[in-house]
Amino acid sequence: MSGQAGKRRIAVVFGGRSAEHPISCVSAGAVLAALDPDRYDVVPVGITRDGGWVLTDPGQRLAIVDGELPEVAGGTPVTLVGDPSGRGLQRLDGTGERIGVDVVFPVLHGAYGEDGTIQGLLEMSGIPYVGSGVFASAASMDKEFTKKLLTAAGLPQGDHVVLRDPSGALSPDPALLDDPTRERLGLPVFVKPSRAGSSIGITKVTDWAQLPEAVATAAAVDAKVVVEAAVPGREIECGVLATPGGGLPQASLPAEIRLHPGTDWYDFAAKYLDDAADFDVPADLTPEQTRAVQEAACRAYLAMDCRGLARVDFFLGAGPDGAERLVVNEVNTMPGFTPISMYPRMWAASGVDFTALVDRLVEVALAVAPTAAGHPTLDGTRA
């Protein structure tokens, strides 16, 4: 063990280069508070908006206060040691001190964190980490490939089209969608960056004249854009959690998001800044509906090859034939851990409090440690 007095040393990594930087900071604040100092030697590592890694001040504000979003402001510069024999961080302040790390909790949302990039870096460095591996992280971050993999697994998806440009510069041309496609999708549609979260860059389009501006907004976040038909129904979420022994994943009690009157949809402000929704944890579902949601959540988790945890989002409503239909919306491999986030709240309602949840995620990460070749072993040994 790298920590003091036999404690596990955990590097909690947060911030990052994506537009979800402040939400990552808020999630990290909750995780840092939940890690028992009697069990863990915790090292808070912030990634600035321009990509610099720093040891942050433990007293740094990691919460939304009066609508002001937090961010990584500075600290002692460090770098991750790429050599697996190093297994840790190195200070860049002239001392050259090595800081051994037993496990990394990458509380990162969006690009350069939730998309397989840091997971690949940690695999190369030989350090165990919380959450899904490279492939599952990348595929789940990309809405196009999430939909393809879930469709292949027989899980219903909403109708959609993907807009891309080989040059990587998507033009907001009104002719991007032809008339038959518009007729098939209907209105409203949601125009989204393919690889982003927290509702950043999403526009609800209720008139096709709004499409060019909506595409431009999404393309400013990601050059690949998804246009989704609106799926009527209740917004249901379910948490999935791995078992340390490598058995089948477990599903939490589902929850429901109910928007207040006057709130059109669950955008960034409704999620984090406004009191715009009520959260039913657990959701008011029949036992049959609960089982269906839990089963579908675990199927989605396995179909995406997730590891450790995931939050699966659904719409529950009537299909075209009038029969009840459960549609998968997204799979989140590193869901929010903010004080209002649904993932920890669903598990608390299921009998796993925040501290126990964080402990279990660390335990799973250590049980499925990366080998020098980047492949996991169930007993944590190295090949």
Image (cartoon, rainbow, N blue to C red):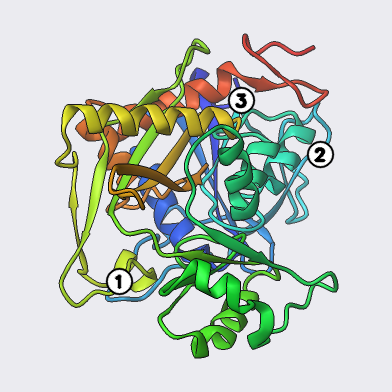
Mark 2 lies on residue: 82
Residue depicted at x 32% and y 64%: 271
Q: Secondary structure at mark 1?
A: loop
Earlier-in-chain disc, 2 versus 3: 3
Mark 3 lies on residue: 2
Labels 3 and 1 touching (C-beta < 8 A)? no
Labels 2 and 3 touching (C-beta < 8 A)? no
Q: Secondary structure at mark 3?
A: loop
Labels 2 and 1 touching (C-beta < 8 A)? no
Could you give the CA–CA distance between mark 2 and mark 1, rounded to whole angstroms? 38 Å
Q: Secondary structure at mark 2?
A: loop
Q: Is residue 288 left or right of residue 172?
A: left
Q: Position of residue 315 (x, y in %)?
A: 34, 50
Residue depicted at x 49% and y 46%: 332
Q: Position of residue 256 (x, y in %)?
A: 24, 48
Q: Residue 273 shows which numbered tag?
A: 1
